[in-house]
Image: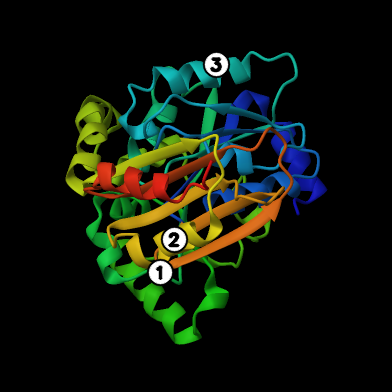
Amino acid sequence: MLSQNLVSQIIDMPNQGLPVTIVTGFLGSGKTTLLNHILQNQQGLKIAVLVNEFGNIDIDSQLLISADQDMMQLSNGCICCSINEGLIETVYDILEREDKVDYLVVETSGVADPLPLAITFLGAELKQLTRLDAILTVVDAETFSPDFLNSEAALNQVAYGDIILLNKVDLISPEQVAATEAHIQTVKDGARILHCSHGKVPLNMILDVGLSPTEQHDEWGQTLEQLANEKQSIASNHLKNDGFDSLSFKSTRPFDLNRFEHFLREQLPDNIYRAKGLLWFQWETERFIFQLSGKRYSLNHDQWPTEPLNQLVLIGRNLDKLTLMQQLNNCLGRK
C-alpha cells in the first residue's frame, strides 16, 4: 500500500511533470500480475496504464483489473520497434484529459528493449511534461538461467533496470535465489534487487523512487542526443537478432480440453517460451485464463464478461506457424 504522505507528494508535484514508471521484463516474468497489484493498492492515486503486446491479440489488457483507471492499447508491435509517435500521442491524450491522472505506468512487451522507450520520455516532446521515475525490470526467479542473458532484449532489460524485481522466489531455494542475484550482478554491478512472490511488493519501494532523473541519463554511456539519433537502429535490430516471433490464434469454436492438453504435453515445441490466452472449452460455461512460461502452465477460470471466444498467443523463436495453426485447429471440438 502507498502511504498517504507519498500519495500527497505525488499529487502535489504537477510542475515536475507526470511521473512515469516503465515496467519491463522477459516473457512470463509476471509484469501483468505486478500491474494488477499496483492497481489494487494505489490508494487514491489515479493511475494511467499503457500496455503493449507482442502479437496481434491483446491478452494483457483483458486480464488487468479495471478500477476507474485508464488503459490505452498501443498499436501492434513492441514499443521499442515503433516509430513512437503512437506512444507520444497517447501520452498527450492522457495529459490533456480534464480528469487528470497522477501517475503513468508503461508495460513493455516481454521481448522489448526498454532503452528506446526511456529515450522517448527523455526526448524533447515529453521531457518537460513527464518525469521518468524508474525502469522496473521483473525477472522470473524460477526459470532464470545464465542462458537467459543470451537474449539481447533480456540482457538490456536487466542492464537498464533501475530496480530488479526478482519474482516467484517462493518457487526456488534460497541458494538458487543467491545464484540468480549473482548472475544479475554480472550484468549490472550494484543492482538494486527486490524479492517478491506473485508480484506483491510494497509500492513505496517501486513508485516515486526517483532513480532515473534526466540529469543522470549519460551514465548509460552516451548523451541523450546520441541515443536519440541511434534509436531507430536500436529499436529495429534487437528482435531480428533475437529471432522472436508470435502466433495469434482465434476461434469462435470451443477447444476440446483433452486435445488441448495433448497439444501441450506432446506437440508444443521447445522453441515456444511464452503463451497466454483466454480459452473456451467444450461443455464449459466459464472462461479459462491460460498462462505458460517455460515448461510451467496454469489454467484458472472466471466468468466470461463477453461472448465466449478462443484467443491465444504463442511467442518463441523461428516458429513453424503452419504446423502450429494446424495443431491448434485440431484441438477444436467437433461441430
In the picture, residue 109 is in which quadrant? top left
Q: Nearer the viewer, residue 291 or 137?
A: 291
Q: Residue at x 28, y 27 (%)?
A: 228
Q: Give the Cα distance between marks 1 and 2.
A: 8 Å
Circle 3 crowding by C-alpha within 10 Å: few under 14, some 14–19, many from 20: some
Q: Give the position of the C terminus as an image quadrant.
A: top right
Residue type pointed to by label 2: Ser
Residue type, mark 3 in image: Tyr
Residue drawn at x 63%, y 24% as measured from the top left:
15
Report the disc number at residue 217.
none
Residue at numbered disc 3: 92
Q: How far, Cα to Cα, is label 3 from label 1?
A: 38 Å
Q: Judge from the rendering whether residue 104 lies leftward or rightward of residue 1; answer left or right.
A: left
| Secondary element type, mark 1 | loop
Q: Secondary structure at mark 2?
A: strand
Would residue 63 be found to the left or right of residue 55 on screen?
right
Q: Are marks 1 and 2 in contact (CB under 8 Å)?
A: yes
Q: Identify the image's colour scheme: rainbow, by chain, secondary structure or one colour.
A: rainbow
User: Residue 233: x percent and y percent?
Assistant: 19, 31
Nearest to viewer (mark 3 / mark 1): 1
Q: Which mark is residue 293?
A: 2
Residue 143 is labelled as: 1
